[in-house]
Image (spheres, rainbow, N blue to C red):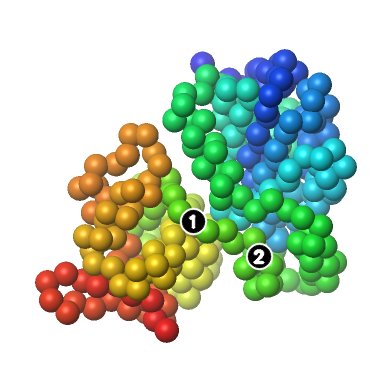
Amino acid sequence: MLLNSLEFKTKLSDAITCSKNDVSVFSAFTKEPALIWMLNLARHDNYSIVSRWHKHDLVCNASDLSCYEICKERGIPFGISLDLHGKVYSVDGHIFVSSANLTSRGMALNSRHNIEFGVGFEASIADQAKISNLKNDVLWLNDEIFEQMKSELAAANDDTIIHQQQWSDKITQLVSQSVQQLWAHELLFSTPESLLRLDFDDAAHVHDFELLGLNIDYLTPKELKNKFGSTRLCKWLREILRTNETVSFGKLTAELHSAIIDDPTPYRRDVKGFIAVLYSWAKFMDDDFEVSRPRHSEIMSLRE
């Protein structure tokens, strides 16, 4: 059953209050008041909290830096996933999926709350495996990384446009985790050349525009390259190429088919379509990737 904002809050809070084993939270934005509200619902501290924590999320107060310290005081793991966009709340074998972030407006904790929708259902074994896989891609914060982030935020330039506020290369490398598995929605549906002729009536363009976090006022080849380079898909591709040095179209198709964790997994013929698009992005990113055709099949490798 589809739940509105207040119904979702009630169902979720009731489940957490009755929970005994585990509450796992994945929320792109996390604010202190909502976090404290949620942590105080259960009679235990068997929580894990994951937030996105882009630098600009913290600069513009979409998320609170203090959330890590609150969790640390209670011995609760707090993690970061720079690619996180979804909102999932897993409670003792039940999963709640919503448009609502862990914020006061998202959780309807005040009268001027957002209009959100969500659903709750009993998790299958496959669903629980997906939650475990999500946790494997998380960087669990420690004091060293937190202090580095805190220092960079203190030195942030107030005059910099929000979307241009980015972590330093040092922090980005620290928080970038190995990508072994992918969801189908993390794949690109359009070639870069097609996306530069953006058409919002094209569902594939809309998907890729949102996945890449593009800004219609900055739709340039350089911006496309920057955005693609930070995706989980690109990170996964780099790791495949570092492991194999060179891959053929068929080899990369097999690797992607094995990496996709959707249930059911897309058919191999559909995965071939995703690989064709991925090859177009590799050619577009010619400073990073090399595509050649020594015989019948195109071969991809990383440039030195």
**Residue 2, position as x, y percentages in the image:** 53, 20
Mark 1 vs 2, N-terminal side: 2
Residue under label 1, please give it: 179
Q: Residues within 10 Å of mark 1 (few under 14, many from 20)?
A: some
**Residue 111, position as x, y percentages in the image:** 79, 26
Examine the rendered structure and indicate whether residue 159 appears above or below residue 134.
below
| 258 left or right, relative to 46 | left
Say which mark, if any, is on residue 81.
none
Say which mark, if any, is on residue 174.
2
- The type of residue carrying mark 2 is Leu
Examine the rendered structure and indicate whether residue 44 appears above or below residue 188.
above
Q: Of helix, strand and loop, which one carries label 1?
A: loop
Frontmost residue, 169 versus 285:
169
- The type of residue carrying mark 1 is Val
Q: Residue at x 48, y 68 (%)?
A: 229
**Residue 112, position as x, y percentages in the image:** 76, 31
Q: Residue at x 29, y 41 (%)?
A: 266
| 44 left or right, relative to 123 | right
